[in-house]
Image (cartoon, coloured by chain):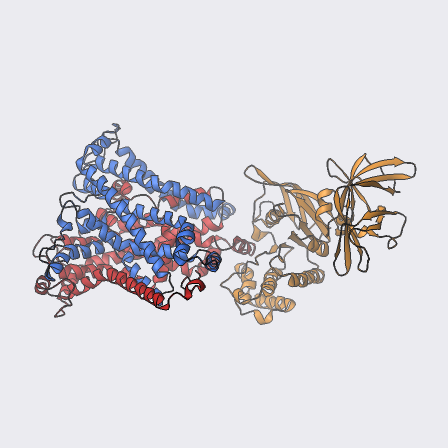
Amino acid sequence: MTDLSMPQTRTRSQSATGKIALRWLLYVLLGLFALYYLMPLFVMLTTSLKSLEEIRTGSLISLPREVSLDAWKTAWSGACTGIQCEGLRPYFWNSVLIAVPAVAISTLLGALNGFVVAQWRFKGANIIFSLMLFGCFIPFQVVLLPMARLLGMMGIAGTIPGLIFVHVIYGLGFTTLFFRNYYVTIPAELTKAARVDGAGFFRIFWSIFLPLSLPIIVVTVIWQFTQIWNDFLFGVSFSQAGTQPVTVALNNIVNSTTGVKEYNVDMAAAIIAGLPTLLVYVVAGKYFIRGLTAGSVKG
Amino acid sequence: MSEWLENHLPKVVLAPSFIAVLIFVYGFIGWTAWVSLTRSKLLPKYEIKGFIQYDRLFDSPRWDTAINNLYVFGALFIVIAMVLGLLLAILLDQKIRVEGAIRTIYLYPMALSMIVTGTAWKWILNPGLGIEAMVQGWGFPNFKFDWLVNPDYAIYTIVIAAIWQSSGFVMALFLAGLRSVDGEIIKAAQVDGIPTWRIYTAIIIPSMAPIFLSAFIVLAHLAIKSFDLVIALTGGGPGYATDLPATYMYAMAFSRGDIGQAAASAMIMMLVVFAIVVPYLYSELRAKND
Amino acid sequence: MAPILDIQNLYKNYGATEILKDINISIEPGDFLVLVGPSGCGKSTLLNCIAGLEPISGGTLSIGGKDMTHVSPKDRDIAMVFQSYALYPTMSVAKNITFGMKVRGVDQATQDAKLKEVASLLQIEPLLNRRPSQLSGGQRQRVAMGRALVRDPKLFLFDEPLSNLDAKLRVEMRTEIKKLHQTLDASIVYVTHDQIEAMTLATKIVVLKGGVVQQIGTPAEIYNRPANLFVADFMGSPAMNLIPARVQRNGTGTQVAIARDGADPIVLTDTRDLDLPEEVILGLRPEDIAESGFRAGAGVQEAACLVDMVEPAGADTYVVSELGGKQVTARLHAETSARAGQMLKLAFDMSKVSYFAKATGERLN
């Protein structure tokens, strides 16, 4: 946008000090809000580095007197999620095992679907796309019961392949949307030229469209990874002891009623569970935001 | 045969996904709708019995609480997140030197799982050692902030955490909107000597109506689906004081073994979402096709 | 010789809307066929149908004597140049040109040889390693043509290939395409909405409107003997003057009266033997109306007209006068002394007049 901070001729004479004061106020406000957003992260981090003793006696926002990584160790490999006490580690890997294939499959399918819908328009393609898009919006509660039964019938209830399957199915709407919106901006003449050149469907996809798609692949992969990693509803509904994703395990650690409440372990566990997506966000924030805004202008 | 395949390959490629969506979205909705009309308890029965599940649902005080909570939570969450998001966007729109860094800070909660957010806020808001204890420690021994365990106020803690999680995202939406306003119009207004705040209220914000609508849809959608945050922060408690439709549905489906109730509550959730989303999607798609 | 392209009774519908209606076109090898018409007339759709990119709803289509009605684009032995050039953005110029051969499994040595040949023909050797995004509009245009030429097809299809270039470059490329056509003796179907492009390039023009062929003919036929009011108005710039007139027959020939506001009608005599209805639209090109004394011949008739406007255009000066309720343009020599508001004697070359039926717009003579 044009810069609104440009000194306006009408007010220039008024007072330069007033302007400077306003500017300061602006920065102070922005800083306060930044503190508000950072505070929980700060508290989590400091709490995770304190001993239980210090947590009980000290203040919420004080820095740890003595930095201890014990809570992190416990959170990773010793904390109890109900009766088992193996920490987050196995569940963290469960999440990886679920997220990686689910992201890969749903992204690939989304790319192919988007390619078809955007570049090979046929009668009914728009209706099909609308119907698929619509699937993004349903509250998943409405499919939980039949899906639980179906997974049971397929014999993959409570397994990691079962969760991969669920995430792929309900991720398709979004991945298709992302690629469709990207490919729709590429002139249809490109496909026509390649067809006249003799290339078939997959050749055109592989040689011409896929090499063009890096930005949208990054956006889609980040979006899907964040969604799947952070999922709780499917994880808690369709897993069993041993196959739970990290979010479910974290919740179990935090809400397990056995023994003393170890807040420092809870916080360390929360950070571990949040770390992968946070890392993705820090490294590829631009693409993350693009996915958010693109995806959530519709959903 | 190969000629046919060549001509229809795009459809063949799209077909599995489309069939999957037909079955797993529309078919499953149909299944749930059907079951919501039966006397299913622990196991689904398929004999239609009319609207008894809905009658039970609307008679249930727990569902009543969940719906009331949804009103309170939804209204506060949407309004505050939008106001805060817009304010932040306008503040950030003033040629801020470290805009990128600040934006990153405001938005990072969106990358976190609601479970992580819930865990963090559960700790911060816990009366024994959290904010309450901290302020008391500062020399205000009578300070009370026990919303998390107070049945009348616990729902507001969910509002607090949800806003922390989502307001940065609303800011990003609005910021993109502010930036897409035609620069010439603003220049013209500046030349006319219109003060900055008037430019915002009279020109920029009205032209962002579609973004307000998008933000509203997204937030409303988030509110209705809210589940993880409640589970992590309050577990629906104290008692069922912070139940939302999503947690009600889950409890009926997986701990109470009342499939009929679960299906009926899920259908109500879906109808609410559709009531909000369908007109929006319809207008979006129509605008696109023109 | 068998026609290189033969289209018979072609129909194309999208749902209930008819895009193309009963198209019949046939061209000989070496022909340069231009499909011209206003936007939305179906000319690009027709080209896509010829390419096989759009299925046709009825009729037949053969290329090089072979029925291609249901054959897929890659087997039609055609090459196509697109309006947006449609260069593959992630491939170098060389790869863009050889992609088609690579897909068809042509061996590397042949690919290299052909690439070299085409690159030198189009003078794009220095560009071969660049990406399309690093090229100017004109260079992209050349590469797009190279991609078509290298295939050495039976038929070239051009879809408004010059419309994205600026005016100067467009004229240059036009000349080059014409030269290429002559050197290669290629058969070309070319789509444009620009009637000047059509006139300069074509050996044969098809004028389309609303999915219906209005006229097929050589540029001269189309220009001098337009088949109806639409063609008359569409082809030529400035457009043909189309003036309502009344026909009065008397012994020597046909007398045509053109009404004027606030003055007596002009009566002009056409000495040709014509059978015309009472009311007609008279069509006369601006260059067939000259200043008195600058045009002679059997059919030339003079009349004084009120000059409404004078528009010098460098080589010529256009003079506008209201006749029969229409703004009639005459193309005068540059040094004319005509002034607005003055009465000026104009010479009408009646031997060049086209007559159209008032009701149907069809040509009458």
Q: Nearer the viewer, residue A123 or C65?
A: A123
Q: Which residue lies furthest to the right in this view?
A: C251
Question: In the image shown, does C141 or A192 lie closer to the viewer?
Answer: C141
Viewer can see residue B248: yes
Left or right: A109, with C8 as reference point: left
Q: Can residue C365 be seen in this view?
A: no
The image quadrant of residue C94 is bottom right
> Closer to the camera, C295 or A290?
C295
Q: In which quarter of the image is residue B138?
A: bottom left
Name the residue at the front extreme: A14
Q: The blue chain is which one?
A: B
Asked whether, in this view, residue B212 is left or right of residue B223, the answer is right
Chain painted in red in the figure: A
In this rendering, would C327 be left or right of B233?
right
Q: Residue at x 65, y 52 (%)?
A: C192
Q: In this view, does B152 lie above or below A55?
A: above
Total numbered circles: 0
Expressed as whole percent of the image width and height from the top left, the position of residue B243 reads 19, 43
Asked whether, in this view, residue B92 is left or right of residue C25, the answer is left
Q: Position of residue B284 (x, y in %)?
A: 43, 45
Palette colour of chain C: orange
Name the spot of residue B13 as percent of width and height, x first. 43, 48
Q: Which residue is drawn at 82% across and 47% down?
A: C305
Q: Where's residue B152, x and y in %?
A: 15, 44
Q: Residue furthest bottom?
A: C126
